[in-house]
Image: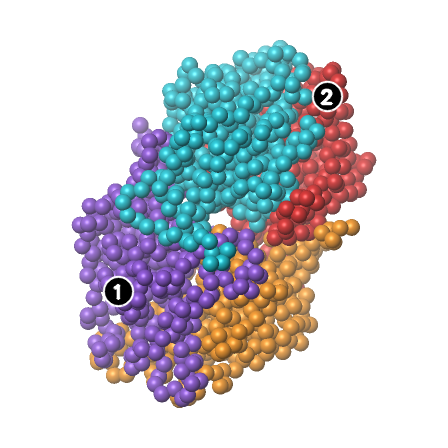
Chain colours: A purple, B cyan, C red, D orange
Amino acid sequence: MDDLFHSRVRPFSVGSPMTAAQLLDAMGGTAFQARNVAQAARIWSRMLEDDVVIMFGLAGALVPAGMRRVIVYLIENRLIDVLVSTGANLFHDVYETLGKFHFQGSPESDDHELGRRRINRFYDVLAPESDFSAAEEFITQLSYTLDRTHPYTTREYFRTVGEALMPVAEEEGILTAAARHGVPVYSPALGDSVHGLAIAFGRARSDTAGPQQAPPVLFDVIGDVLETAHIAATAPATAVIYVGGGTPKNFIQQAEVGGYIFQRELPGHKYAVQITMDQPQWGGLSGCTFEEAQSWRKIAPDATTVTVNVEATVALPLIVSALAEGSADVIKKRRSPAISFDGMPGAWRRDGGSS
Amino acid sequence: MDDLFHSRVRPFSVGSPMTAAQLLDAMGGTAFQARNVAQAARIWSRMLEDDVVIMFGLAGALVPAGMRRVIVYLIENRLIDVLVSTGANLFHDVYETLGKFHFQGSPESDDHELGRRRINRFYDVLAPESDFSAAEEFITQLSYTLDRTHPYTTREYFRTVGEALMPVAEEEGILTAAARHGVPVYSPALGDSVHGLAIAFGRARSDTAGPQQAPPVLFDVIGDVLETAHIAATAPATAVIYVGGGTPKNFIQQAEVGGYIFQRELPGHKYAVQITMDQPQWGGLSGCTFEEAQSWRKIAPDATTVTVNVEATVALPLIVSALAEGSADVIKKRRSPAISFDGMPGAWRRDGGSS
Amino acid sequence: MDDLFHSRVRPFSVGSPMTAAQLLDAMGGTAFQARNVAQAARIWSRMLEDDVVIMFGLAGALVPAGMRRVIVYLIENRLIDVLVSTGANLFHDVYETLGKFHFQGSPESDDHELGRRRINRFYDVLAPESDFSAAEEFITQLSYTLDRTHPYTTREYFRTVGEALMPVAEEEGILTAAARHGVPVYSPALGDSVHGLAIAFGRARSDTAGPQQAPPVLFDVIGDVLETAHIAATAPATAVIYVGGGTPKNFIQQAEVGGYIFQRELPGHKYAVQITMDQPQWGGLSGCTFEEAQSWRKIAPDATTVTVNVEATVALPLIVSALAEGSADVIKKRRSPAISFDGMPGAWRRDGGSS
Amino acid sequence: MDDLFHSRVRPFSVGSPMTAAQLLDAMGGTAFQARNVAQAARIWSRMLEDDVVIMFGLAGALVPAGMRRVIVYLIENRLIDVLVSTGANLFHDVYETLGKFHFQGSPESDDHELGRRRINRFYDVLAPESDFSAAEEFITQLSYTLDRTHPYTTREYFRTVGEALMPVAEEEGILTAAARHGVPVYSPALGDSVHGLAIAFGRARSDTAGPQQAPPVLFDVIGDVLETAHIAATAPATAVIYVGGGTPKNFIQQAEVGGYIFQRELPGHKYAVQITMDQPQWGGLSGCTFEEAQSWRKIAPDATTVTVNVEATVALPLIVSALAEGSADVIKKRRSPAISFDGMPGAWRRDGGSS
């Protein structure tokens, strides 16, 4: 038998009820995207057994789409060690943590009517603006309490938000879980979200209410760059999981290149999984292959990688359910590498002065 | 509570092991494509409880991709009543039924080397040409035995192939199961496949071997049109499931319009599910919406429909597994409507003469 | 300068008015799909200078979308030698040749209202069913005049339709131009279109009107396979251009493999251009790469190829306009290879008997 | 003639050489994406005649892909009034302005070899890391000269970069042209790019070279939110053009909602064009329709909008070339609305103190 023919396609058989882990095992014997979904679970499981920091990039409107508890599961059970997401997901997390809901609508809705009634649509999901306002006001009020003498990295900001939410949370969310479990959360375009709007609103309001006494709240976006590069530079090795592209993917990719900030040349991420509907042929970073990333040395030449072209609301629950079931022992035993910014050059500590 | 807000998004929770039916039930509470996958299973289940003929269109290289036994399951358990597929899938079915295999390869293969070694690639699936030859020769030999006095509809041809395979089958396949269970199989572009090539080869060979005495085997492609329109025209109602687009989708869609052949105006298909990665904005039939089809009256104005934009190797096993589990009773009880061509105007019967 | 760096990206400059040929020349200095569009024109121009039979596959609803005259230009000026298309495009060609029109609508139309008013929608194009009926009736009436003693290849059928249209044509169309200029036209799924419906209607009507005296009109779909394989086998070399995927692409691809019908092993198509929005990762033939096709030896190992991922209503007019302008001399001088079926094994001639 | 049938499809005719404006005019008579491309040029032309601030969002690797001079043209001729882009495009602009080049490569490159040779790939574009280093060092050196007593909005930062480039520029670029012509440039995820890396590198380096005396350079990302909302709130009306999705699109979309920061409720953008390959059905902001945006009141209910699903390297040069030619008078006459931040609540002026 030829070397090319070591692995037969095993046709998927419908029979007695199958669990998530069984479904993915059966899909792993087939082809196309089913095989990729199965491969993603296998690679993630291998990450969990290895000594690597797992960085997770989350783009897309996945919290409104009902994926918030999946992310909470990932944090609580430490299937991921660092979260990078859009401000939007981290706003909708606040919203749901405060007990507000998203609703099932239709992509064929009458958007003029929705606009008149102040109901916002995300494809087939709806939410009333009036409920958003409560969450926005929470953020605006919180912004008044922030330290104005030092800028916040987005990690510091989101930990503060998570802690502020704990006493009022209706249920555990991404930011509360991350704060509780010490998982750093970054958002490279914080201003580009309701977090940014709500803080800007607070700033303009306090300004118009009278002369602004203190400097406004500031965010140390370069501090984010330093910290994520430091995480990559000090990790035993790194693994990445991207759900969608955008700034979360790019930001984690560049963390590996950023080793040079600390005079280190890093080997590239050791494992890489992406779940995306973006395609390479449009030329952008969101859809680019991990092969392309190897030319940048963001991904190690011998990395184990897979790209899954299945929309994330399907792929992510399947993969995480299969891991929770089939890799339960691995998850339980995992000791995730410590993340520390002690002695990081360029650090600007909240407790006073640079390092 | 507003009428728009009757249904909250229920975030997907990872917890104890979930079966396919449970996974789809949980996905049904979310959004985007997960919700569509769940909706597809629900609509299919409703088809099974209703008095409808279920027509199934299958495009794409899904047999090489390991989906053959799923289709066999659909036929054996009568989740579908009519199958329309590409000649390619129905050739690869013959190939696997004869005990030949497909293999897992890589989309990044060296295709020049594969070409030199005569190994054919289908994305990440491989198969050796030498094994194809055996299946081709089976078809060529069968073609010599066909009746040359009357043309075959593709349904008659595939039933004949299925019956010819039965004694030599290594395992049950699509065509053997369809022949055994009386499920008609059509392929509107029969020539456009190895079936066509193998029969053409037989015709050229017999010709060069000496003067051709008999007329060649003929296919009554207009008979296919009549029969499928007749099925639609005489069914209590029709339901359609499309995996991919292409001729299978168009052919089943037009069957409903084709009622006019028999002076009947049909109401449009009553249920419609499609699993496709094609998009509407390229303008073609493969990606078109069921709304567009309603302008053609191919789909009933009040039809229950869903479009699932998840690649079929993931969506189809999930949906069928969930149905096999969650709708087991419905499947067991189903009595599919009888399909008969007796008295069909324009029929040209194999047993002699037109009707 | 490194060998990898022989060709700088030349940024596109907006300045004085540019013609199609100039636009494509400038795009050729850039990247992504603009570079591919330019490359497609260059490869097509090279085909025209070489001694090759150019086979053109046309899928998608491009005639309703206003591309009919572009195809007519290709036929009249012999930028293509063989046309393979869907029955739908070749029906809408009859429709427009008979002086009927398509109209600009909106993809957001109310399809229920359209359905009630019997207006059919193709994405953003509309047409009234009543006008279709005239074209359908033309085909039905024509079908009564066809020779019932021998089956028609689709080439013979479409030539007959083209000739029948000439006296009544409001303007030159695809089928009239093809008949006039001797360009063979094939449609591997003829039944899967209004051609099929209209002929089936004629058959059922004559049947119900009384006992059917003669056998019905038959189509020799295996003859199509033989003929296209024969074209490939007897051509000095072949080039292919695919607009969309589907049966036109597959049928032309298999023609090269089909050389084995005549005991010939062909080298694979020498040039290959495809304009498509289908993607490889769904595993189907429509979206597959030309690299994949090289594993099948459908495309020559040293072929010159390009895939253009730009929707065809944009890419095709651009490319053909640029060729008409920039390759005018090449077009004028071209002598296309002769296509003949004389002595083709397996032929079944209209003039009596097989060869 | 029915109201639905006021506009016939005008088939595209290939004939005498056509210019960009003529090509788009002809495409405007057709369908699918060709019609959308033409419509985009028409809507853009109407923006130029109206009294609106035109905000332009640019995502994707379009500067490496050769689109930089098109953007420069837009700035110099004031076809746009505000630019929001990714840090990556604005880094590659610095790179090209400093006389460095991108090169044409292949998407099928051997990325392991590229990685070893330190050549970075962007789909089919290549660039040597060594040349990147020069541009990075330019930014790092510039960062040492920045004012550390006040944070920079990204607009202030990019104006400073543009001015610093002017004396050393090999040719006019996006940032030099924007600085020269007073077009504000924002980048909502500045850290997520080589700008961020190069500044972080400078910060860590100065830190390790000895105790950091001064606070590091800071960016006022909330100031960006205030400013863009202020632009929207004080404009006579706004128009938006998005090339790709990502943070540029979202940031401009939210500017309209952000009117509430200044106690204003804005009517939604009045004109909206997007050129994107992202699709709505994945649920994210990048691919969402302008209809969905109307539910958020980001787009006015009566706005004139179009979505073009053609990759930007093809669509953008076509549209801008057609405007430069066909709307030359409109462009020449245009007086773009003044943009000023005087009296903006929440402002924190570089010249000392908040407003």
Q: Quadrant of the C terminus of chain B?
A: top right
Q: What residue type is labelled 2?
A: Thr
User: Callout 2: helix, strand or loop?
Assistant: helix
- Which chain hosts label 1? A
What is the crowding at mark 2: few (fewer than 14 residues within 10 Å), some, or many (at least 20)? Answer: some
Q: Nearer the viewer, residue C231 or C132?
A: C132
Residue found 74% across the figure and 40% down from its top? C130
Q: State whether residue B4 is above or below residue C225.
A: below
Q: In this view, does B235 lie to the left or right of A248?
A: right
**Mark carried by residue C208:** 2
Q: In this view, does A57 lie to the left or right of B193?
A: left
Residue found 70% across the figure and 45% down from its top? C117
Asked if residue B284 shows in the view, the reply is no
User: Callout 1: helix, strand or loop?
Assistant: helix
Which residue has dot 1 on it?
A: A179
Residue A336 placed where, x, y %?
A: 20, 56
What is the crowding at mark 1: few (fewer than 14 residues within 10 Å), some, or many (at least 20)? Answer: many
Please determine if labels 2 and 1 lie on a single subunit.
Answer: no
Q: Are marks 2 and 1 in contact (CB under 8 Å)?
A: no
Q: Distance between the residues labelled 2 and 1?
A: 78 Å
Q: Is residue B176 left or right of residue C205?
A: left
Residue A191 placed where, x, y %?
A: 40, 71
Q: What residue type is labelled 1?
A: Ala
Q: Nearer the viewer, residue A307 or D113?
A: A307
Residue found 60% across the figure and 20% down from its top? B341
**Mark carried by residue B221:** none
Asked if residue C278 shows in the view, the reply is yes
